[in-house]
Image (cartoon, grey):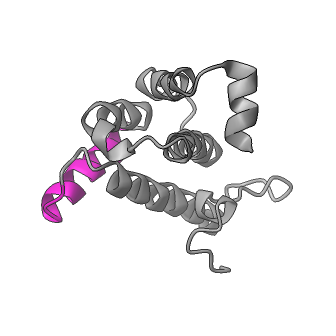
């Protein structure tokens, strides 16, 4: 049903896929390194990738192009951590599935560290990306 709605609004499936790919390929590095900005960036990338999967596109086949583009949008430290992690675990740096899992853990760690430090305003609690997608959700 969702595909039909998108087709009727935006035209051909290929155009919809290309819009998602273009968006991911043209990500700009975030300027605000706050936990909420990191979380929003991760959620946005994940939504685009999930939309591609829902449209029948195999995101792994675009990993060599998309992984570096997605990583460039994140802070240098996270990029460096990914390269070290991928080498240590003997993973391809272009493995988009492993990259997104890694990014979710990095963002989750940043949010948790800031919550521990008490640097977040209590009236604006940030839901972690894992909590937003109910992925491995466990109450803290």
Q: Residue furthest bottom?
A: 139
Q: Nearer the viewer, residue 103 or 64?
A: 64
* Rendered location of residue 133, percent (x, y): 64, 61
Q: Is residue 88 magenta?
A: yes
Q: Is residue 69 left or right of residue 122?
A: left
Q: Is residue 32 magenta?
A: no
At 45% from the left and 62% from the top, the residue drawn is 105
Which quadrant is home to the C terminus?
Answer: bottom right
Above-or-below relation of 2 to 105 = above
Q: Which residues are magenta?
A: 76-91
* Rendered location of residue 106, percent (x, y): 44, 57
Q: Nearer the viewer, residue 74 or 17?
A: 17
**Res 118 visible:** no
Which quadrant is home to the N terminus?
Answer: top right
- Magenta span: predominant SS is helix
Q: Nearer the viewer, residue 7 or 109?
A: 7
* Rendered location of residue 19, percent (x, y): 54, 22
At 56% from the left and 47% from the top, the residue drawn is 54
* Rendered location of residue 37, percent (x, y): 61, 40
Above-or-below relation of 92 to 10 = below
**Res 32 visible:** yes
Q: Quadrant of residue 76?
A: top left
At 36% from the left and 37% from the top, the residue drawn is 71
Q: Quadrant of residue 128?
A: bottom right
Q: Is residue 30 left or right of residue 96?
A: right
Q: Is residue 115 left or right of residue 125?
A: left
Picture mark count: 0
């Amino acid at each position: 049903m969702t595909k039909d709605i998108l087709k009727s609004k935006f035209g051909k499936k290929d155009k919809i896929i290309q819009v998602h790919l273009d968006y991911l390929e043209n990500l700009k590095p975030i300027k605000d390194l706050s936990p909420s900005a990191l979380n929003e960036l991760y959620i946005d990338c994940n939504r685009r990738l999930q939309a591609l999967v829902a449209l029948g596109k195999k995101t792994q086949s675009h990993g060599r192009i998309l992984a570096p583009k997605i990583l460039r949008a994140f802070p240098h430290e996270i990029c460096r951590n990914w390269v070290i992690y991928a080498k240590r675990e003997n993973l391809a740096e272009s493995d988009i599935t492993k990259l997104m899992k890694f990014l979710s853990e990095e963002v989750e760690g940043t949010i948790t560290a800031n919550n521990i430090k008490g640097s977040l305003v209590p009236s604006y609690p940030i839901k972690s990306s894992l909590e937003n997608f109910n992925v491995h959700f466990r109450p803290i």
